[in-house]
Image (tube, rainbow, N blue to C red):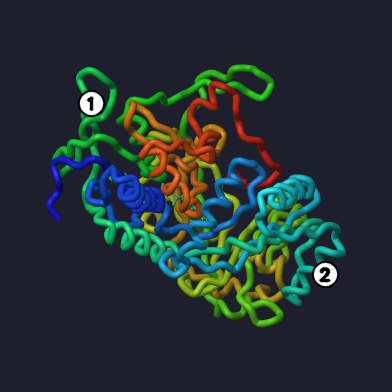
Amino acid sequence: MGLPTKVKYVIIGAGIHGLSTAYHLALELKATGKGSGSDILVIDKGSIGAGASGIACGVVRNNYFQPAMRELMAHSVEVWESDPKAYSFHPVGYMQISAECMHEDVGTIYEQQQAIGYESTFIEGAGDCQKYMTGLFDDWQAKNITSVLHEKRGGYANNTASLYGLAGKAEAEGVRIATGVEVTGFEYGSNSGAVTGVITDRGTIACEAVVVGAGPWVLKFWEMLDLPKAISIKGADGTMHENVPMWKFWCLEEGTLGVDPEMHKTNDGKMPPVIHVDTDAPLLSDVDGSLITEQLWGLYYKPDFNFGGIQGGASPYKVDQDPDQVALDPYGPDSPDFIVGDDFIHMWCSMLAHCQKRFEGQIKHYKHKEKSGGLGCFTPDNFPVFDIFRENVYVIADSNHGYKMIGVGKLVAQELVGEKSRLLEPFRFGRFAKGELHPVSHSPFPWS
Ligand SMILES: Cc1cc2nc3c(=O)[nH]c(=O)nc-3n(C[C@H](O)[C@H](O)[C@H](O)COP(=O)(O)OP(=O)(O)OC[C@H]3O[C@@H](n4cnc5c(N)ncnc54)[C@H](O)[C@@H]3O)c2cc1C
């Protein structure tokens, strides 16, 4: 496709956020009579799904300790449910199974899910939890579990299939998607700081507004837009913390046990919900019985025909490096640095065996040949920033929460045509200086 030299909206990134914004913006423009999909160009330096969206495990859940995140996720689940076929969405539900240190936090999540009408069941106490879990899986054996939150909605989607579903819907509305085009900078107006053109390796595209949906590459765009590398944050006690780095990287560790996905069916022969367990029971090696950890640990897993086995992951680790020096490219499975190793495989397979007897001794089936894992770029409080910078640049920085957040693009599209979103309001950049931070849970994951 020849690259246009002028278009009203340039959306950078053909991941979940760029594509969802493009599709929903096309619908909004049509509905409001303000234009159509032909006013939108999506560009990506790689291909559709070249970033985090293309390797995401695809878990879609509501389970968040932060009320604003929960409301946003409930909205996104509605979008997934609106076209499960095109989005390759499997509505199998989701379970948060936790140790006592998380009991109270998860109890508040349950209460608030009831308040917003998000269907879930909450089981409390070790005995009742064990009974509930063995009612689903007769080999359930995870220890120190005192609460189970069973979300009846949510589940998972197949990563690239859903992206192609979204891209197809966007193109059907007249949106153009140009891949293999790299953004290298911006042109600015002479009388304002607004962007007037997007500079690419194939020429400059004049535009009226830009959306950045660049996933882990967001810090590169932050720099191109001349936004601050370090910021001031007001803490809960009112103290101002100066010079806090805006971005940091965590490495997500995931993998696949190459067994028949059907082996993880429930007692009544159905496909199970996505399972997430956090426990402080000692984790012993399923290979030699040695102690792996006595700290709180967590894993998630699901049977997945797309990945060809039981797919899931464990807590990520923080990348202890200057974020500007972190090698983002090649990304994902092609990275020489940020893919999982033997330690993860040993630990995750032992976690699976800790939870269900059927996974004992299965480590030999781990899919070693398929490289997995990838980087996520996080904000100072680990929650998203959805905001407009330099007057006309909408930055969608999801702090790696985001494959499940297919609805964010819909809300961003509404904001682009002039309708403010209550759901996006708690995620503005100004919250850091104002000290309007989100509450923090006891979960071992930076995204709960
Ligand atoms: C291993 C892993 C597992 C995950 N699992 C889940 C999960 O189960 N559930 C969940 O909700 N989230 C999950 N996440 C997080 C989720 O994948 C991300 O939050 C989300 O996909 C980010 O989407 P995005 O559209 O912002 O960015 P991306 O999908 O990363 O897309 C950004 C695009 O921008 C392009 N780009 C970058 N720089 C340029 C440039 N200069 N010019 C042009 N194009 C450029 C890239 O090529 C890329 O295609 C996971 C993340 C990882 C790494």
- Give the Cα distance between marks 1 and 2: 63 Å
Mark 2 Cα-neighbour bin, 10 Å: few <14, some 14–19, many ≥20: some
Q: Quadrant of residue 95?
A: bottom right
Q: From the viewer's perspective, is 269 left or right of 342?
A: right
Q: Tell me which label, 1 or 2, sits earlier in the chain.
A: 2
Q: Residue at x 59, y 17 (%)?
A: 240
* Secondary structure beneath label 2: helix
Q: Residue at x 35, y 63 (%)?
A: 164
Residue 339 place in picture, x, y as percent? 45, 55
Q: Nearer the viewer, residue 256 or 48?
A: 48
Q: Is residue 327 above or below residue 120?
A: above
Query: Does label 1 point to a residue whose CB lies under 8 Å from ligand 1?
Result: no
| Residue that badge 2 annotates | 131
Q: From the viewer's perspective, is 262 left or right of 334?
A: right
Q: Is residue 12 above or below residue 178?
A: above
| Residue that badge 1 annotates | 188
Q: From the viewer's perspective, is 428 left or right of 74?
A: left
Q: Is residue 335 above or below residue 152?
A: above
* Secondary structure beneath label 1: strand
Please, what is the three-letter code of the amino acid marked with disc 2? Lys
Q: Nearer the viewer, residue 3 or 306?
A: 3
Q: Residue at x 64, y 17 (%)?
A: 239
State if disc 2 and disc 1 touch (CB < 8 Å).
no
Residue 8 place in picture, x, y as percent? 23, 40
Mark 1 Cα-neighbour bin, 10 Å: few <14, some 14–19, many ≥20: some
Please, what is the three-letter code of the amino acid marked with disc 1? Tyr
Residue 56 place in picture, x, y as percent? 47, 57
Residue 293 place in picture, x, y as percent? 70, 53
Q: From the viewer's perspective, is 361 left or right of 2?
A: right
